[in-house]
Image: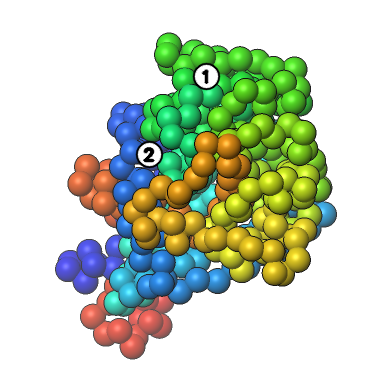
Amino acid sequence: MEIFDSAKTLYLDLPTVAAFIKDEGVETIMEKLIPYMEEDYSKWDEFAKIPRPTHHSPVGVNELMPVGNQEIFTCKYVNGHPSNPKDKCLTVVAIGLLADVAHGYPKMLCEMTLLTAIRTAANSVMAAKYLAKENPKKMALIGNGCQSEFQAIAFHKLLGIEEINLYDIDEKATDKLIKNLSHIKDLKLNKCSSTREACKGVDIITTVTADKKFSIILTEDMIEKGVHINCVGGDCPGKTELDSKILFMGDVYVEFEPQSRIEGEIQHMDEDFKVTEIAEVIKTGKRIDRKEDDITIFDSVGFALEDFSILRLIYDLARENNIGKMELLVPAMEDCKNLYGLLK
Ligand code: NAD
């Protein structure tokens, strides 16, 4: 019996995770996640890191996102297919795995589409906390698809954003966001008719659009003094959101430089273009020394460590709250050299 129990994997399917997050509150999960992320980013040098292996096709990308330290290894499978919604499929779906390093056994297999949206929004807020001007109140949110409500909630609940200017080329996406968040009475949502209009007078601009091409969502003339730009949607070779000239307007921060050079906004820049890994800032535990008018750019592509942090958190929460099912996915046997015995 004991052998069976220790070999079992905690299985968390989408309905189980969704119900748990609904009960806890999405902002509570984000609030709990940020210290996990800060702890993991602070231990940056202890992790074995690689740019994610990718499989590209004309319509999208299939990716694996592995990372580990001496205790835990995690890996996410994720895709990015911007034209999926026209076939009633999501642009991004994901599943995650957490394994122990001691024996290499999978300890948890988990839905990760919701968790990706949560960790991406928490990561954006964590970076903004260190990089953006103090007490930002107004944000532009360009791209109002699946990730957008999570970004809006995170910036409102965890960073104090009170007003968000919304723009999407698909008006229905913006209407959906406004309806989904109508219960948050102290958050003002303004539907705009262009990106330019949305970016007027804001402290933060978040771009979270999906298109498998070099898009220019933001141009230099839309960027006002003192703005922090949180670019989330450009995360693949050939898929970017900013006019490259913007990258010269302020300091650029990335997650894992070798991966960002391939996938981020900085894929257009020369190799000697200076960027700072966000871990370097987080390790100091302090906000950057920024002047009121400085522009900062977080060129986020999504890094495996953010998945590591949320899988670690969900594993802890699932065990604390006794959710999910234990399933036997790998063999458990007295004689560990007798795999064939399973077939007898
Ligand atoms: P989605 O397809 O649900 O939403 C994307 C929205 O962008 C759509 O509503 C679309 O109409 C809109 N859009 C496209 N072009 C636009 C334009 N020029 N101006 C304004 N709006 C435009 O996709 P999603 O799940 O919300 O993901 C958005 C993007 O974020 C994707 O590219 C995805 O790969 C990326 N992403 C990044 C991370 C990260 O960690 N950096 C994590 C998750 C997703």
Q: Which kind of residue does numbered mark 1 sit on?
A: Glu
Name the residue at 22% across, 64% down. Answer: 5
Q: Which residue is mark 1?
A: 163
Residue furthest left as drawn? 2
Q: Residue at x 50, y 66 (%)?
A: 66
Dot 2 surroundings within 10 Å: few (below 14), some, or many (20 or more)?
many
Horizontal and vertical percent position of residue 174: 65, 20
Image quadrant where one finds the N terminus: bottom left
Q: Which residue is mark 2?
A: 30
Quick one: SS at disc 1?
strand
Q: Are marks 2 and 1 in contact (CB under 8 Å)?
A: no
Spatial distance from mark 2 to mark 1, Cα to Cα? 20 Å
In this view, the residue in front, 278 or 77, is 278
* Percent of width and height locating residue 317: 26, 46
- Residue 127 lies, in percent from the top left, at 47, 46
43 lies left or right of 194: left
Quick check: 101 above or below 325? below
Q: Amino acid at mark 2?
A: Met
